[in-house]
């Protein structure tokens, strides 16, 4: 599914007895891999965003659970279970918004809880489950990419698609959600170019999404976040596709800070705005987006660029990492099971019993 010349990007890889993470804090200047052998190191890697993006941190946390299970020195099932719950708590405390993290950890806990096996057997089942979560995510993203083709506007010319942040291979087990749609549109010959918001303050658009596009040979134009409305007004954008970190039952979708403004701009210009995400991103326990926890990060991300401080002492900061786009602004949610209108998500998925 990727360009025949580009090597696939896998940000979280199991290798014999440890996990290899692409260090996303060093891209695009340096491609380096970090070896993770302990659950606490995995928790730190998630917190410091060596690995980031909702599905990718789910996969990483699942492996973190297995590494934690390996660290528990007992063959007594009850003692093992108590210690495993503590590993889960430490991994859960890393990042609050992306529900995939909690989804993957609870799937791992369920495997351990429901197993009739010995502790060594449970450990083996946990590794198997983590690997399955990674493989399923890859297939899920490829399916999202294919379903995404059906929502792209029909036009005589090839399309110009805007995306925000990085919902690419780096943010998943590989391939990507929003960038999965980009990849399949590019392979199908329907894409002229991707416009990428730089995505202040951590610049995932500039550093990661543009890197992925260049890697695949997909034409890419980087803009600063405050240029999106202008580009839409000038007729440069045909469709917007973004990822999500958590989607409430009514279709309200949390994604990287700035996504909401892009959705408002798209509505003002009559440009369709789609969210591409796996079912593991949907949180049916939340009726709407007001209950989605929004991570606040270190203010240094706002005021410091390299060695340079951007503002005088005495200024206060507010650094929310995500915002919630109301369902009313979303034309459709592209999942591995097809495309749903946000208001139909809950009923349709429940009636198909696939949620
Ligand atoms: O803070 P990040 O870089 O983890 O935020 C990532 C995003 O907001 C992505 O758009 C989202 O996780 C979707 S990833 C397929």
Image (cartoon, rainbow, N blue to C red):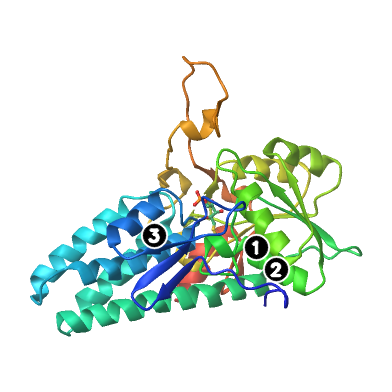
Give the residue furthest to the right: 156
Quadrant position of residue 61: bottom left
Q: Please give left or right for residue 219 compared with residue 354 in the image.
A: right
At horizontal 48% and vertical 37% (from top left) the residue drawn is 320
Q: Residues within 10 Å of mark 3 (few under 14, many from 20)?
A: many
Q: CA distance from mark 2 to mark 1?
A: 6 Å
Of the numbered discs 1 and 3, the one sitting upstream in the chain is 3
Residue indicated by mark 1: 179
Residue 163 visible in the shown view = yes
What residue is drawn where x is 64% and y is 73%? 7
**Distance from label 2 to label 3 (Cα)?**
25 Å
Residue drawn at 22 percent across, 80 percent down: 122
Q: According to the image, label 2 marks what residue?
A: 183
> 10 Å neighbourhood of mark 1: few (<14), some, or many (≥20)?
many
Dot 2 alpha-carbon crowd within 10 angstroms: few under 14, some 14 to 19, many 20 or more: many
Side of 44 relative to 32 (left or right): left
Give the secondary structure at mark 3: helix
Q: How far is the residue under mark 1 from the one under mark 3? A: 20 Å
Near-viewer residue (262 or 212): 212
Residue highlighted by disc 3: 101
Q: Nearer the viewer, residue 299 or 28?
A: 28
- Residue 284 visible in the current orientation: no
Mark 2 or 3 closer to N-term? Answer: 3
Numbered circle sitting on residue 338: none
The residue closer to the viewer here, 26 or 160, is 26
**Do the residues bearing badges 2 and 1 touch, measured as CB atoms within 8 Å?**
yes
Determine the residue positioned at 26% across, 60% down: 88
> Which quarter of the rendered picture does the C terminus lie within?
bottom left
């Amino acid at each position: 599914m990727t360009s025949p010349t580009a090597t696939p990007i896998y940000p979280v890889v199991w290798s014999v007895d440890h996990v290899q993470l692409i260090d996303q804090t060093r891209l695009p200047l340096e491609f380096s891999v970090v070896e993770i052998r302990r659950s606490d190191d995995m928790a730190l890697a998630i917190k410091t965003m060596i690995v980031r993006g909702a599905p990718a941190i789910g996969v990483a946390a699942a492996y973190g659970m297995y590494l934690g299970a390996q660290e528990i020195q007992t063959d007594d099932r009850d003692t093992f279970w108590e210690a495993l719950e503590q590993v889960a708590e430490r991994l859960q405390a890393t990042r609050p918004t992306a529900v995939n993290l909690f989804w993957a950890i609870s799937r791992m806990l369920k495997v351990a809880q429901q197993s009739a096996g010995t502790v060594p057997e449970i450990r083996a089942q946990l590794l198997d489950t983590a690997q399955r979560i990674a493989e399923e995510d890859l297939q899920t993203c490829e399916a999202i990419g294919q379903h995404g083709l059906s929502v792209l506007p029909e036009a005589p010319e090839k399309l110009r698609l805007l995306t925000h942040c990085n919902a690419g291979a780096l943010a998943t087990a590989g391939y990507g959600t929003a960038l999965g749609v980009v990849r399949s549109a590019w392979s199908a010959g329907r894409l002229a170019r991707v416009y990428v918001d730089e995505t202040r303050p951590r610049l995932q658009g500039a550093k990661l999404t543009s890197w992925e596009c260049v890697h695949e040979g997909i034409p890419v134009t980087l803009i600063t976040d405050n240029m999106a409305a202008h580009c839409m007004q000038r007729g440069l954008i045909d469709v917007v596709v973004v990822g999500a970190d958590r989607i409430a039952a009514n279709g309200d979708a949390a994604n990287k800070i700035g996504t909401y403004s892009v959705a408002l701009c798209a509505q003002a210009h009559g440009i369709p705005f789609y969210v591409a995400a796996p079912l593991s991103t949907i949180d049916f326990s939340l009726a709407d987006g007001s209950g989605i926890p929004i991570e606040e990060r270190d203010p240094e991300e706002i005021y410091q660029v390299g060695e340079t401080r951007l503002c005088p002492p005495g200024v206060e900061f507010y650094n929310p990492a995500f915002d919630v786009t109301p369902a009313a602004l979303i034309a459709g949610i592209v999942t591995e099971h097809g495309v749903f209108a946000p208001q139909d998500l809950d009923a349709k998925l429940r009636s198909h019993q696939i949620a």
